[in-house]
Amino acid sequence: MRYKAMRYKTAALAMSAVAAFLIAPGTASAATIVPFQIEPAMYGNPNGSFDVPPVRCGVEVGKTRGVATVTGLMRQRWGCLPYLWIRWVNLSNGRTGTAKMSSGLNGIPAEAILRTDVGQVMLTLDVRSPMTPGVAVVWVP
C-alpha cells in the first residue's frame, strides 16, 4: 500500500513539473520592426521629391518588454525625420502619451522611445503639410 502511494506522489510531482514548464512564460522573441506609411511629398510620391527626402520610419517592438521604439528603416536606422511628434494610445489598457523624435545629430539617427506597456498600441506620426501623417498599429510584447 505504501509503495502505491509513493508511486502516485511521484507521478503527481512529475506531472506538476511538466505543467509548470509548459505554463511558464516564454522569453522575449527577437525584435521586429513594423514600417509606417508616410507619403513625404505632394501627390503621394513615396520616393520623395526635390525638396522633401523619402521618409522611412518604423516601430521596433520586442526588444524590451512594454517598450516601442520609433526609428528609421534605412541602413543604420536612418530615414525617419527628426523632430516629429508621435502620439500613441495603448488600446489594451487605455494609456496614452506623446513623444518627440530626437534631433538626429552627431551621427546618431533620430528615434523616440515609447514606454507604452504591453498591449495593442496605435501610433501616429504628426507631420506638417503637404505630408500625410503616418499611422501604425502594433502589438508591444
Image: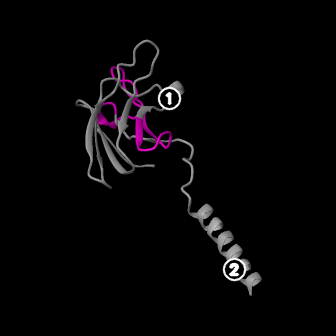
Quarter of the image where one finds residue 43: top left
- Cα gap from disc 2 to disc 1, whole angstroms: 60 Å
| Residue lying farthest to the left in this orientation | 129
Residue drawn at the location 35% of the way across and 48% of the way down? 121
Using the image, tell me which numbered label, if any, was put on residue 74. 1
- Identity of the residue drawn at 49% across and 44% down: 62
Most extreme residue toward the right is: 3
* Closer to us: 100 or 57: 100
- The disc, 2 or 1, on the residue closer to the chain's N-terminal end is 2
Position above or below: 17 against 98: below
* Residue visible at 70% across and 82% down in the picture: 5
Q: Which residues are magenta?
A: 40-69
The dominant secondary structure in magenta is: loop
Front residue of this view, candidates 129 and 118: 118
Q: Secondary structure at mark 1?
A: loop
Q: Residue flagged by tag 2: what amino acid is it? A: Tyr
Q: Which residue is mark 2?
A: 8
Give the answer, above or below, for where 88 lies relative to 77: below
- Front disc: 2 or 1: 2
Instruction: From this view, report whether residue 137 is shown above or below residue 55.
Output: below
Q: Per the image, is 42 magenta?
A: yes
The location of residue 7, given as percent across then percent down, is 74, 78
